[in-house]
Amino acid sequence: MSHQELHNAPIEAAAPKGRSLDDSLQFIKGVGPQVAEKLVKLNLRNVGDLLRHYPKRWEDRTHFRDMSDVRPGEFVTLCGKVIAVSTRYTRQKLAITEALLDDGEGAVKLIWMNQPYMEKTFRALASAQKQVVVYGQTKREGYSGSSYVLEMQNPEWEELGEDGDTLSANRITPVYPATEGLRQGRLRKMVYSTLQEYTQYVEETLPPSILSQHRLIGVQQAIQSIHFPESESERQLARKRLVFEEFFTLQTLLALRRRANSHDVQGISFSATLEELQQTLANIVPFTLTNAQQRAIAEVAANVTSGRAMNRLVQGDVGSGKTMVALAALLMAVKSGYQAAIMAPTEILAQQHGMVMQRLLEPLGINVEVALGSLTQKRKNQMRDRIITGLANIVVGTHALIQEGVDFAKLGLIVIDEQHRFGVLQRQALALKGVRPHILVMTATPIPRTLTMTLYGDLDVSVLDELPPGRKPIKTHWRNQEKREQVYRGTQTLLDEGRQVYVVCPLVEESEKLQAKSATQLAEQIAIEVFPQYRVGLLHGQMRPDEKEDVMAQFKAHELDVLVATTVIEVGIDVPNASVIIIENAERFGLAQLHQLRGRVGRGEHASYCILLADPKNDDGRARMEVMTATQDGFRISEEDLRLRGPGEFFGTRQSGIPEFSIADIFNDMDILAETREAAFQLVEADPKLTRPEHHPLRRAIENMRSKIGLMSVS
Ligand code: ADP
Ligand code: MG
């Protein structure tokens, strides 16, 4: 059957009863239990899954590139005949199998390591004179003479049009994510026959008005064309439509939630007013708040007095002054007769918040309780008593806050600092300590705007896009290890001027113990050999909390000049007099981490420096060093970070809640994302519960999606 017939295939008039996209794949011709098992490995269980198993790429097999035109480094699809095959063994007994593929114009050498069985396969192809299609990245062969031969290591390959398979030749051919033992040709046929029988059951979930306004093709057409497009433009139309659908469904879900939060949910209405709050802040805060801080505070105040539950994200670079926004929110709660809690990811950070809150708020008669996991049982019990009796107005703590036994008398507001460090469940657990408390989440990892939209579309967002006045830019230099002496001499000058210095130890991933050991050694070396005339302190994760606290306090009080530390200082200490941070083996750190570390300096009126001692061994590492020296803009850095690492790894964990898209690409489809966001919010404005009949299919699609993803929101 040709692809022409596919598109003209008549829609069956009377489909057998009871067919649906939920049908098991075993109903498809040629799928027995064994194949079904392999399909499960690809997460394909039913017909609907298979129809949405989109190709990972398409190969235009109507014409192939001439091998003689291809440059080294290109990713290409080539086609030719196998003219020679051989296997040799290296001294280490490594089998290297090579096959020469020739298209009459040129040749490419295919190479496999330790897959000697390839020899037999390719010999058979050679003697049968078969056309073979290969895909991969070409390299220039290292040791050849004048006319070079390209090579391709471990290419993807298949026989062209195997057994007269018309789906795999002379057309734009889909290539699917596959699994071992399931050949492309097989998958293609399966998808093809599934399309034939089931396309008509695919439901259009986009409302007609959206389809026409955004010039999108229908879903059935799109599903057919995405698998077997007749032209590149047809493929693009199909892709655009499917990407739109994926984003639009998510954005509609977010718009519904946002609306539910802001319109329907009864929340606590605080009685304190913004004016009162501003008055108090002016009295207790030793500096003038930035415009961005004032704006964020006003936004918070508007939320908490509205009678509806607040769900707000404060996003601001390191040092932008988020703590003051948190403090203002906590103050609103206390002034209105409620308790409030703030949760931070590390003990050091919680302690620091505790100190700030105590210093500024206790003079007002507000009791600030610090809840840490490391407290003694006796102190824990006392703390719990003070919280449940309502004696504690504000509770600052780590995840110890959400443990059993910590109960509040009247919790009205929670703040979660560095919220991406907590899982969804932890954030929920804190919220459940009250009855629909107001929620403020804060993050210092500036999130690319694209992600803000997809992750936090259901939250209100305040952005602190302004640093407190007087901050000098941090000069960032990347130096090789051999420049170490020079770096130390420069640092010495600043120490002589009375500044303080951080030295960050190389990252040791194997264990906390080893990390502590290497930190200790480095500290000794620096104290004895490098800066013998200065006071050198040490901070690492294996120290007891009270030891850490002591060192931190000493450094803050300038009783130490140099602090050698592991990444425990990443989100920790705030010392304005520290103006140099030297990061050892900086290439081992991720971009977000480097940026956080750098944020430890540049907090006072002094010119500050960040020195990256690094000898990166790959492009990735070099790219990271270059980004760091090129910009100090957290948003740009996070964009680069996301680009270099990809969304999956960006926040490290699955539970980060970044939805996985099946066809949309969060970078390249940014325009479509923005388009869908606007459209979705408009639609929900017009039909807030999606009750109109033309929106019912969309509602079903949303229910489906809701069950698949866990979004960030705490509510
Ligand atoms: P973030 O949590 O956003 O990284 P912090 O709240 O820790 O930042 O603030 C960083 C430093 O800036 C602290 O020393 C804080 O006291 C100071 N700071 C905050 N707001 C201002 C302001 N408006 N003017 C001057 N200094 C400020
Ligand atoms: Mg902070």
Image (tube, helix red, strand yellow):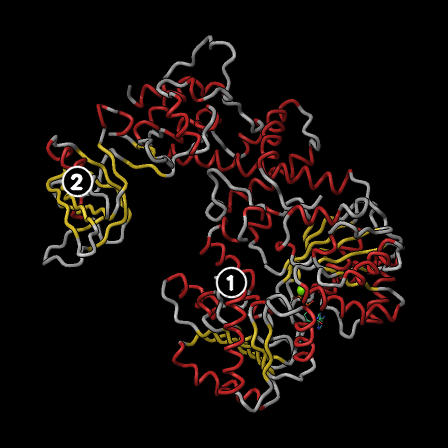
Asked whether residue 257 is in view, the answer is yes
Residue behind mark 1: 511
The amino acid type, in three-letter code, at marker 2 is Glu
Disc 1 residue type (three-letter):
Ser
Residue 322: percent from the left, percent from the top? 70, 63
* Residue at x 72%, y 67% (from the top left corner): 351
Mark number displayed over residue 648: none
Q: Nearer the viewer, mark 2 or mark 1?
A: 1
Above or below — where is 189 with respect to 434?
above
User: Can you tell me whether the CB of the residue at mark 2 lies under 8 Å from the nearest atom of ligand 1?
Assistant: no
Name the residue beneath numbered marker 2: 119
Q: Nearer the viewer, residue 242 or 392?
A: 392
- Crowding near the residue tagged with mark 1, few <14, some 14–19, many ≥20 C-alpha atoms within 10 Å: few
Q: Is residue 475 visible?
A: no
Q: For ligand 2, which image quadrant applies?
A: bottom right
- Between 401 and 314, which is closer to the camera in this rendering? 401
Q: Residue at x 78, y 46 (%)?
A: 309
